[in-house]
Image (cartoon, grey):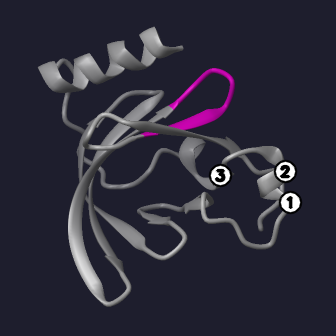
Amino acid sequence: MKYFIALIIAGFISGAYAEAVKSSFPSDFKGVWDANPEQCLKRFSTARVTISDNIIEYWESTGEISKVIYQTESSIKVNLAMSGEEERWSVISIFILTEQDILVDVFENGQAFSRVRCGNET
């Protein structure tokens, strides 16, 4: 798993993938995601994200895709225009969807956070 993620990140850094034209999340990425199935059952969770066409909603912030930088069948690198708590900022994020239907969010500092798909729309 770590090797797979490292290969995808290396591909993004080297520019091995063509730049995508559309600015939305692929359909497989859309939905509600959380840290584990138990968290999915809770009404509120600080780890939960909801992904729609071109919006990602975190606990106290929202990001709108301003540019899709790279996209493959199982990964996307996007520039997000973020807002929350009366502030605005820009962030580049990588999202990887594994074969086990786990969403890996790779942050600019190289750290990653994994989430499972929630079966219910919480």
* Tag 3 secondary structure: strand
Q: Amino acid at mark 2?
A: Glu
Q: Residues within 10 Å of mark 1 (few under 14, many from 20)?
A: some
Q: Position of residue 32 (x, y in %)?
A: 67, 57
Left/right placement of residue 71 relative to residue 58 reads left
- Residues tagged 1 and 2 counted as in contact (Cβ below 8 A): yes
Q: Say which residue label 1 marks.
A: 41
Left/right placement of residue 34 relative to residue 60 reads right
- Residue at position x 55%, y 71% from top? 59
Q: Position of residue 58 (x, y in %)?
A: 51, 66
Q: Amino acid at mark 1?
A: Leu
- Magenta stretch: give its range: 97-105
Q: Say which residue label 3 marks.
A: 33
Q: Say which residue label 2 marks.
A: 38
Above/below status of 11 relative to 103: above
Do we see residue 90 in this rendering?
A: yes
Above/below status of 58 relative to 79: below
Question: Which is more foreground, mark 3 or mark 1?
Answer: 1
Position of the C terminus, as image quadrant, is bottom right
Which mark is first along the chain, 2 or 3? Answer: 3
Q: Is residue 54 magenta?
A: no
- Residue at position x 37%, y 38% from top? 76
Residue farthest toward the top in the current orientation of the protein: 3
- Residue at position x 45%, y 27% from top? 73
Cα–Cα gap, marks 3 and 2: 12 Å
Q: Residues within 10 Å of mark 2 (few under 14, many from 20)?
A: few
